[in-house]
Amino acid sequence: MVHSPSDAPLVLKLDGITKRFGALTANGDVTLELKQGEILALLGENGAGKTTLMNILFGHYVADEGNVLVARDGQRLAELEPGSPHAALEAGIGMVHQHFTLAENLSALDNILLGTEALSALKSARAPAQKKLAELMARSGLAVNLDMRVSQLSVGEKQRIEILKALYRDARVLVLDEPTAVLTPQESETLFATLKKLSAEGLGIIFISHKLAEVIASSHRIAVLRGGRKVADLPTEACDQRQLAELMVGHEITETVREPGHAGEPLFVMTGVSAGHGREALHDIYMDLKSGEILGIAGVSGNGQTMLARVISGLETPAQGTMTLGNRNLDHASARMMIDIGLARIPEDRHHDGIVGAMSVSENLAIEAIRKPENQQYGLLRFSAMRERARKLIKAYDIRCQSEDSPARLLSGGNIQKIVLARTLETEPKVVLAAQPSRGLDVGATSDVHKRLLAARGRGAGVILISEDLDELMRLSDRIAVIHRGHLSAAEPTETLDRGTLGLRMAGHSGKDAA
């Protein structure tokens, strides 16, 4: 928690913003203010309207009602031209998206300069830019090698480039969407120390997060959206995590607790597995998953987690090594074979790999079992049976949609994840591969995902939990291994580990270094 600059002037005001998409009101008469030097945390469950509101601020959407006012000429608030990202940038509004918008093949300096120079310029003003950036880095603590290609930088360094891009354009307001989603604990601490330093110099900051502990530790004020409307706007010192969770979802959240388990015999085993090439390659992986346990895999994004998930799910064939499920050899297993023998996959990218957006909810719920008799007969799909099953799953998993015939692409991220969970877990699989299962989900949806995974563990399934969220791993996992540059450490009981040690190992330090 930090002290609020109570007497500071306003640098931004979103006044009575309303935005409708057909019958859906994404934002309803939302008013939000930001003072100079203030850090404002914006909270809300999935589909609450946070992203829509920020897209209106940055000019990606035009509000149906209301307007955006920004400080001009030092103090005066003036209306911002709607629907113009260029106008937003000119007014000093910078945005750092959760998924970075960097050209990986260019240097850090080139990425920062992109879009700041006229196409008619005879040459790039690199020397003055480097001087200005050196001053910015010294003042803010955002150190990065400007000459390095972005593809060679860590996730934390890429985020620093995104912030430097905004500061280089003389941003007075900085918006960050889920800024710590892919950072280690140490990188997160460094980021918030930097944000506090920038706010002390007068920068107004809005950050969207689902991590309530970091919100309380790092903000001056907290605004909460629910159902598209602002339901709270409070000084941080007046808030606690339980209160914020209830404000976000509208009811009390029961905390998920992992009870001591009774792991059985090894169920799924990888021995000396190598696969892929480049930065995402796997090298000599040894892993054993027991029945009735959750095995956590910690790691910073881009260290081989995606390739590991592809190999386990049968989408990638190992170059060497063996895999077994029970007594069955899986050397040449396909994705279809893995599903048939009892592996359920919760993919990392639920929008791209988890659903077919143009298909209905009922079709997506049946898609991995489409060949089974309950879904087809004599080669013809049994749509009525698929709809009936879908209605039961929609109720059981609280999938919020207009009907089972609604296109899946219209659902929020949390409800899409519920489709994936219902489709996979209702088959009572032997092994559950859950890759980033709560990424971007609100506290209510996250709680539901965690309960489902613990229930699978409780009935004897083995769960492989690949996550960049250490709180999630520590809460759910019986054992945790760390993946770094394609190498997987030996799994250790969660009770013997702490966040600091795991964070250091995720950054590439050995157990001895971590100690």
Image: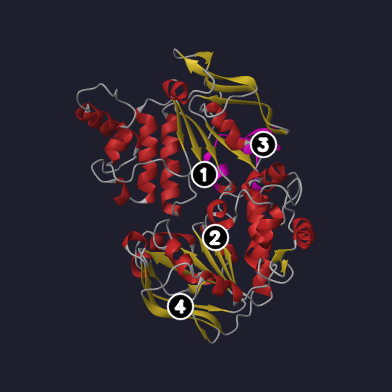
> The residue tagged with tag 3: helix, strand or loop?
strand
Dot placed on the residue nearer the N-terminal end, 2 or 1:
1
Tell me the residue that label 4 is attached to.
332
Q: Residue furthest bottom?
A: 327
The stretch drawn in magenta includes residue 220: yes
Please name the amino acid that badge 4 sits on: His
Using the image, determine if residue 260 lies above or below residue 466. below
**Labelled pair 3, 2 in contact (Cβ < 8 Å):** no
Dot placed on the residue nearer the N-terminal end, 3 or 1:
1
State the CA–CA distance, disc 3 to disc 1: 16 Å
Tell me the residue that label 3 is attached to.
225
410 left or right of 218?
Answer: right
Of labels 2 and 1, the one closer to you: 2
> The residue tagged with tag 1: helix, strand or loop?
loop
Tell me the residue that label 1 is attached to.
178
Of labels 1 and 4, the one closer to you: 4
Using the image, determine if residue 184 lies above or below residue 203. below
Quarter of the image where the N terminus is located: top right
